[in-house]
Image (cartoon, rainbow, N blue to C red):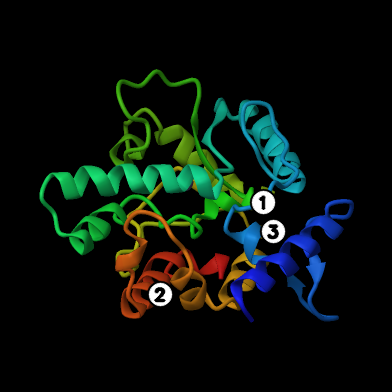
Amino acid sequence: MKRRSFIKKSVATSLALSILPSVSFANNSSLDYSILELMGKIDIDLYGDGYKLKKEAHEAFVAMKRAAYTGGVNLKIVSSYRSFDRQQLIFERKFIKYTDEGLEPLDAISKIIKYSTIPGTSRHHWGTDIDVIDGYQKVDGDVLVPSKYGEGQPFADFKKWMDENSEDFGFYLVYDDNKRRRGFSYEPWHYSYAPISIPMLESFRSKNIMQIYKNEDFLGSEHFTSNFLRTYITDNILDINSKLL
Ligand SMILES: [Zn+2]
């Protein structure tokens, strides 16, 4: 299908669905999400006080936050929904910085994807994923560093509480500390609301990602080869906590 007619069809579909829940039935048995929604390219209904999540994920988070208080932990979301445009800004800013410092484009991209995603592939586009910390702890500097979640560190109690309870509320760690995992490093703060994100990942896998990125046009995207994208998807998108597959 040509890109133009593809987009037209997807937009028409998403407009038709804007009065209904943001999912459509591709066939009788499985849920499907449009590629525009999966890539953070359309406005979806989002909920939350100081953060943005899909309704069901927001409600589950509120319940989990309430429970965590009784355990002495104040769950505070520092990052939730993020649009394609926002991810593009982050990616391009880093691409300019690293290439200005003298890195070849492909090396710059490799460096970026150690910690950031390629626009359109972030789980934060889905309204299901959060970066969450303990708001009670006063911490110097960056809060999203793994060492602060270790024994005796500011977020140790947070980690213990989440390890014991988060899955009861549907929230699973995405980038766990399994040493055999490739792709993104251990992120003890990044949780995903599995009841929605599992079908969303399944939808994403069913799309022709190679074809989609041939038509993408942002700084650095012209350097994405098929091999690069294949490895990126295998390692960074799919090599996650197996409970989320
Ligand atoms: Zn995150």
Residue drawn at x 39%, y 48% as measured from the top left: 187
Residue drawn at x 45%, y 42% as measured from the top left: 189
Q: State the residue position of label 2.
A: 234
Kindly tell me whether residue 33 is visible in this rendering: no
Q: Is residue 111 above or below residue 208?
A: above
Q: State the residue position of label 3.
A: 196
Spatial CA span between label 3 and label 1: 17 Å
Q: State which tag comes first along the sequence, 1 or 2.
A: 1
- The number of discs equals 3
Q: State which tag comes first along the sequence, 3 or 2.
A: 3
Q: Nearer the viewer, residue 177 or 27?
A: 27
User: How far across and how far down the image is residue 25, in percent?
Assistant: 82, 72
Residue 24 in which image quadrant: bottom right
Q: State which tag comes first along the sequence, 3 or 1.
A: 1
Is mark 3 in CB contact (under 8 Å) with mark 1?
A: no
Spatial CA span between label 3 and label 2: 21 Å
